[in-house]
Amino acid sequence: MIYVILFLVVTYFGGIHAECGYQSCHPVKSDQINIHLIPHSHDDLGWLKTFEQYYWGSHDNVQSGGVQYIITSVVAALKKNKDRRFIYVETGFFWKWWLYQNEATREDVKQLVNNGQLEFVSGGWSMNDEGATYYQTIIDQMTWGLRKLNETFGECGRPKVAWQIDPFGHSREMASIFAQIGFDGFILNRIDYEDLDMRRKNRSLEFIWRGSPDHLGESSDIFTNVLFRHYSAPAGLCFDVKCDDEPIIDDPNSPEYNLASKAEDFVNNWIKPAISAFSSNNILVPMGDDFMYQYAEKNFFNMDKLINYMNSRDFDGVKYNVIYSTPSCYVKAVHDATNGTLNSAMKTDDFFPFASETHNYFTGYFTSRPTSKGYGRFSNNFLQVCKQLSTFANLTAEDENAKLDTLREALGVFQHHDAITGTEKENVAHDYIRLLHNGITNCENITSKALMKLVQLNEPDFTTCHMLNISECAPSETEKNLIITVYNPLGRPVNKYVRIPITDNSTGITITDPNGNQLTTQIIPIHGYVQKTPGRNSSAQYDLVFKAENVPPLGYKQYFFETTGNSSIPNEDFSKSEKLQVVYSENGDQLTMKNGDYQGYYGTAYRYYTGFGGEGGTDDPYVFRPDPDISPQSVGHNFIYIQYYGPLLSETHAYADNEWFSYVDRVHAQSSISEQEYLIGPLPYGRTSMEVIFQFSTHFEYDDQITTYSNGRESINRARDHRDTWNLTVTEPIAGNYYPIVGGITIQNGSKPGIAVINDRAQGGGSISYQNFEFMIHRNTISGGGAQEPLNETAFGVGVVTRGSFYIIDEKALTLGTITPKELSQEIYLGSWIFFTSPGNVSFESYQKTHVMEFSGLSNVSLPRNLHILTLEPWGPSTVLLRLENFIGNEDKTNSGLLTVDIQQMFSAFKVESMRETNLAANNWLEETVRMQFNQPDPKQKKVLPQGNNFNVTLEPMQIRTFILTISY
């Protein structure tokens, strides 16, 4: 066992002595202005071209860029001059390049990393978006990229600074995550034009950002720098082969001589304005842009000349110390120059929404490509299931790890800021789906093997149905007998209403649970518009519903599906449920809803905005700009409503007078949650953009403030027409009040709970008018913006159709605390997974005797309600990675608070022999994670000490703790 622990230290966190990191920084001078040139290439993992096209450099007619050439060229250029520096961000690209290199090239790269010439920053698989992403997927993709760097380069490969210079706005949770990883600084770029102007004027482009002001406090603080002028090289100094700027000509006898004028222009037009915007004598100057340095020597050759010239003279009596540098060296220089004390105000909110100019609010991408966003959420759900089952079944063979890695890496690519955002070209979006589908297919092989082992079934395979959301599933439509396995990836028991399509309602079907109990079922017709969904490959007209109760945590229950000779009729004639009473209008609005004896009424409506078509910019995949002169229009008229009632649920099917919009109202028996499931598309496409919204109106007053969840995690309040750090000029009263909605919106009824509406994927939304808030569901645009292609998605030869749901927790349920918004959000984002397999020709009784129909990976201990097992996955020989999260914060006074668990007693599938705590990304032991300190620590903030081999672990509200466990089976 001692051997295993030592192995981990060397493999994951070890490193040889080298002059990397802060030791490798070029000296700065306290009596001069230090100009830090940061050579970099911003390499998108897909945008106008696919991941593969960008890597190989193909399709140059679309965009010039070949990552394989960039990295190879940079390595050669760095070897020529030890003074040169270069930073690289996207581990997904770097790792692909690394796998093709011979040993000699790999040794060259290791030497460059060890002497600090090549520095990795951020280190995630991609430079993830910060608006539409879910915190779990951010942590996963950062962990996977950093692990590759750590295993390959050791200590010198571990980044010290985050570099997020292209996402369209920045989230508070991102700052918290980076602080918990252990980064010393955070370099960002795109912030609101008014905010940027103000910060330039008052020298507050550098500040401390507190990512968790209400919970983690000082431990979530991170030094933050906003780039002065984007991430491209200064005008006149772009020396790349892609640029039109003249190279530096340093022969004074040449009629083309321009070295002096280029240096003077740089000082006058860039450096002097930047000096007036920063408080220290250090200025960060990015030297690069998108897919630059394919011929790196040209860039460095010219920069060498500029550095030598500027360091040899003064400019109007001022000396500049121009050096090759990196973000970490820059952060250290600022820290040393200021003695770690910044005068600017601490930031505790975020940088959403981001507007680049008066009418350009980047709030459209919160919703763009809703089917891709939904599929990304679906993929992450399955990745967590796959990792857990692989752990419990001890599937650690090399080929199985490789299959798991395909989904890890596909999701890492999909978190990229031009992937999940929907701001890529359509063929690129299709390629992201291809990557995710391939990863899911590989993971299905693992989950099938794992379940066969746990269930003790030799054959056949366990399969899944990817199209259950449109009632398509071959096993339930073609097989007479089935084993339905419901796997719960959460750390608490859940109830799951299983809904599967069937083709024939004339033949009876029974569902039997593991104890031999025959369950109540209900058959409901599939909505007529759903049956017509383009691409749906199913003749099923009915859904069979049953309730899987108390599915064990991190475990499964199996149900025996068997056809009988008895007739089964759709439940259209049951007596009306008293649970749900709804009044509708002819244009599809839900005017009132009464839930049981709850007297609070609320209404919903579906509308659409018409995009602005005048001068000054239109909306596009990034930007939302509705026409201010056109009120939101109803999605349809003359609605027809068909209601179905039964023992398990009540449903109303709404049909518009067009065939591109419909919805279902649903409430389950004994449930305090109502659901609205929509089907939208193909959207009409014409001369103006169209954005469909879901509006929610309340019966009570609230103070123009909604609560959202930063990347689906910590709550953050949003007030209409307000920004915390500057006086907002309201130019776009709708788009300017849109925020990223990941996990839903909650409002208060004065001092009492109000309403919570949980969405099933990332969307844009906000409070636009009195007593109303809304979500954007689907959109098309006539302009392409930076994507150079209008957003008019197609599938199966027509406009794309999206189906999704909203879940509503009313005032009564919130008051009683039967379920919290965060608990419901988890059950949606990490829903129970349905597997299908055939029992063969055996009866239930025979199957029950020889197979394990119920399993939990946890022991029979009652875990605290506020504990979330965020991560459980195979990590190394006899080791697993475990993350525990105290996920309920101060917004829920009843259910939040300290929790303590005994990790050694948690699991039934394996024994925990020992454990050691790491930072959030699991690339450094916690006790060795020492961060650079800015400003004085808050004495009120508690220090969390690393956990030794005491298996009892305590977590404060919103704290995540990460451990590598050594286990035995």
Image (tube, rainbow, N blue to C red):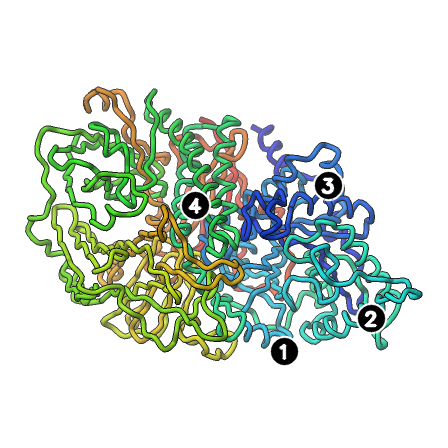
Helix, strand or loop at label 3? It is helix
Please name whichever residue, 54 or 769, is drawn nearer the observer in this view of the structure: 54
* Mark 1–mark 4 CB contact (< 8 Å): no
Q: CA distance from mark 2 to mark 3?
A: 36 Å
Q: Which residue is mark 2?
A: 261
Of mark 2 and mark 3, the one earlier in the sequence is 3
* Residue 631: percent from left, percent from top: 32, 74
- Is there any visible trace of residue 598 in the rendered image? no
Please name whichever residue, 951 or 93, is drawn nearer the observer in this view of the structure: 93
The answer to whether residue 350 is left or right of residue 655 is right
Q: CA distance from mark 4 to mark 3?
A: 35 Å
Amino acid type for the residue under numbered disc 4: Leu
Amino acid type for the residue under numbered disc 3: Val
The quadrant in which the C terminus is found is top left
* Mark 4–mark 2 CB contact (< 8 Å): no
Of mark 1 and mark 2, the one earlier in the sequence is 1
Q: Which residue is mark 3?
A: 109
Q: Which residue is mark 1?
A: 201
Count numbered badges in the picture: 4
Q: Give me the disc on residue 870.
A: 4
- Crowding around mark 2 (Cα neighbors within 10 Å: few <14, some 14 to 19, many 20+) is few
* Mark 4–mark 3 CB contact (< 8 Å): no
* Mark 1–mark 2 CB contact (< 8 Å): no
